[in-house]
Image (cartoon, rainbow, N blue to C red):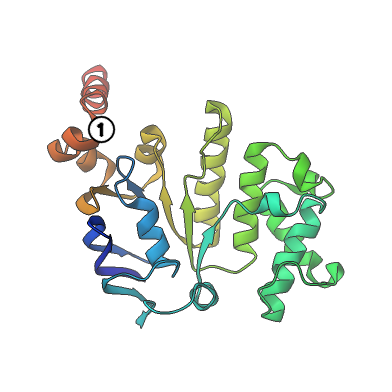
């Protein structure tokens, strides 16, 4: 469905991504990991049109997205969840979702245009129910907890009817319990909506638990791709990013079993 073919991007002498090729199949749940500065966010920016690769192609459903505007890429079905809930401080959750749904229906893609809330209420209610935020429809966005704001960000992305959903550190800034509640929502969303989801995440316990495939970047290059067990045991990944702890924990669990 989404194929990165030898994409590279440099900023002066810094190679942010280097000849990266990755396949994200339809309905897959994939993680992109790596040290700080590895090129993860730059990779997302190239997929979504915020940055144009110097070389390579970003293919989506047999269409090259390179050179397309971010708006055109979103319309095609590749949507990124940004931290935009804070842009609606005086709107309720229901109103913010209705605004996003209406922007999709009208094709205006301008969330701050006047909109008839009632015309989009059914879809916005469906999204709120899906995210477990039905009881927060009347809550102002500015009054939401950090975790609920991030859930609303995902809801606003869902309103744009994505085929591929990109999540950049969906659990960032959360405590342990809130982090796991968020990732459980993401996993349930993936299972119920038949989405292709790609997420960047630093919490390796989360990555190893839910990702079908893990892609490891280091200094802008693709270091490895594989299942959780393959990545956990990959010596190059251990040396560059994981350290020995994850490998040791895995071995200890096997011994206990």
Q: Is residue 154 left or right of residue 38?
A: right
Give the left or right position of residue 20, taking residue 78 as reference: left
Q: Residue at x 19, y 34 (%)?
A: 238
Q: Is residue 37 above or below residue 206?
A: below
Horizontally, residue 142 falls left or right of residue 220, namely right
**Res. 28 in view:** no
> In percent of the image, x 13 and y 36: which residue is there?
235
Q: In the displayed image of the protein, which residue is found farthest to the front? A: 12
Which residue sits at x=59%, y=69%?
A: 161
The x, y position of residue 240, in whole percent, is 19, 37
- Image position, residue 179 (x, y; %): 53, 34
Q: Position of residue 246 (x, y in %)?
A: 26, 27
Taking 109 as reference, is 21 above or below it? above
Is residue 86 in view? Answer: yes
Q: Is residue 179 above or below residue 139?
A: above
Q: Secondary structure at mark 1?
A: helix
Residue 64 sits in quarter: bottom left
**How would you rate the neighbour count of disc 1 (Cα within 10 Å): few for under 14, some for 14-19, many for 20 or more?**
some
Where does residue 83 sit, x and y in percent of width and height? Answer: 59, 51
Q: Quadrant of the C terminus?
A: top left
Is 177 rendered above or below residue 54? Answer: above
Residue plotted at (75% across, 67% down): 112
Number of numbered callouts drawn: 1
User: Would you name the residue on which mark 1 appears?
Assistant: 242
């Amino acid at each position: 469905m989404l194929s990165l073919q030898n994409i590279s991007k440099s900023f002066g002498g810094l190679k942010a991504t280097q000849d990266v090729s990755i396949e994200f199949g339809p309905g897959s749940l994939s993680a992109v990991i790596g040290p700080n500065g590895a090129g993860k966010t730059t990779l997302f920016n190239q997929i979504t049109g915020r940055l144009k690769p110097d070389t390579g192609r970003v293919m989506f459903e047999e269409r090259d997205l390179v050179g397309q505007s971010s708006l055109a890429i979103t319309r095609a079905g590749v949507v990124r969840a940004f931290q935009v809930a804070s842009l609606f401080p005086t709107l309720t959750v229901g109103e913010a979702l209705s605004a996003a749904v209406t922007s999709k229906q009208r094709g205006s893609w301008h969330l701050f245009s006047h909109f008839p809330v009632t015309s989009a209420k059914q879809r916005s209610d469906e999204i709120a129910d899906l995210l477990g935020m039905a009881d927060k429809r009347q809550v102002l966005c500015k009054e939401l907890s950090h975790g609920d704001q991030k859930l609303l960000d995902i809801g606003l992305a869902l309103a744009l009817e994505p085929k591929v959903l990109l999540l950049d550190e969906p659990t960032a800034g959360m405590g342990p319990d809130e982090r796991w509640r968020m990732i459980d929502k993401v996993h349930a969303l993936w299972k119920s909506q038949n989405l292709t989801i790609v997420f960047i995440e630093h919490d390796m316990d989360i990555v190893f638990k839910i990702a079908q495939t893990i892609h490891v970047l280091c200094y802008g290059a693709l270091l490895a791709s594989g299942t959780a067990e393959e990545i956990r045991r990959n010596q190059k990944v251990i040396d560059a990013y994981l350290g020995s702890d994850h490998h040791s924990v895995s071995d200890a669990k096997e011994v206990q079993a």
